[in-house]
Image (tube, grey):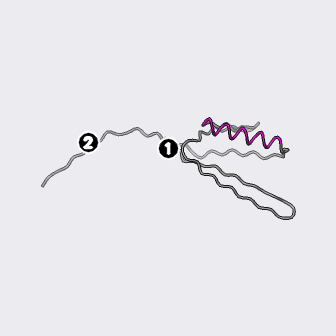
Amino acid sequence: MRQGKKNFRHESLQDRASIQALLKSISQGIAKGKLTLSDEDDEMVMQPDGLLQLKVTAAQDAERHRINLRIAWQVEEERPKKSKTLRVKLK
């Protein structure tokens, strides 16, 4: 059964060491095949598997520099296999 769309969003100011630790945890979660994202308001568990799509974008101007990382993957739904009988009629 397909589940509805779920979202998790967290935004905060962090120092470099904290960001590094978060990225390391994300990397370890991807390696293990299970990512749990949580804060005081919400929690989401994801299970990355198979081929993952990576998108990296960067921009900089005089006052602000930005890096965006996007990691995405397809989730295959487990569907019960229906046993159907093939019939061929000759005329």
Q: Judging from the image, what secondary structure is the residue with disc 2 in?
A: loop
The numbered dot on residue 7 is: none
Give coordinates of residue 62: x percent, y percent: 86, 64
* Label located before the other in sequence (1 or 2): 1
Residue located at (59% from left, 39% from top):
47
Q: Amino acid at mark 2?
A: Thr
Left/right placement of residue 59 relative to residue 80 reads: right
Judge whether 41 appears above or below 87 on screen: above
| Viewer-nearest of discs 1 and 2 | 1
Q: Amino acid at mark 1?
A: Glu
In the picture, the quarter occupied by the C terminus is bottom left
Residue linked to disc 1: 76
Q: Main secondary structure of the magenta part?
A: helix
Give coordinates of residue 77: x percent, y percent: 48, 42
Camera-nearest residue between 6 and 48: 48
Residue located at (78% from left, 42% from top):
20
Q: Which residues are magenta?
A: 17-33
Residue located at (65% from left, 55% from top):
55
- Magenta span includes 51: no
Q: CA distance from mark 1 to mark 2?
A: 25 Å
Q: Judging from the image, what secondary structure is the residue with disc 1 in?
A: loop
Give coordinates of residue 19: x percent, y percent: 79, 43
Left/right placement of residue 83 relative to residue 29 reads: left
Judge whether 26 appears above or below 72 on screen: above
The numbered dot on residue 85 is: 2
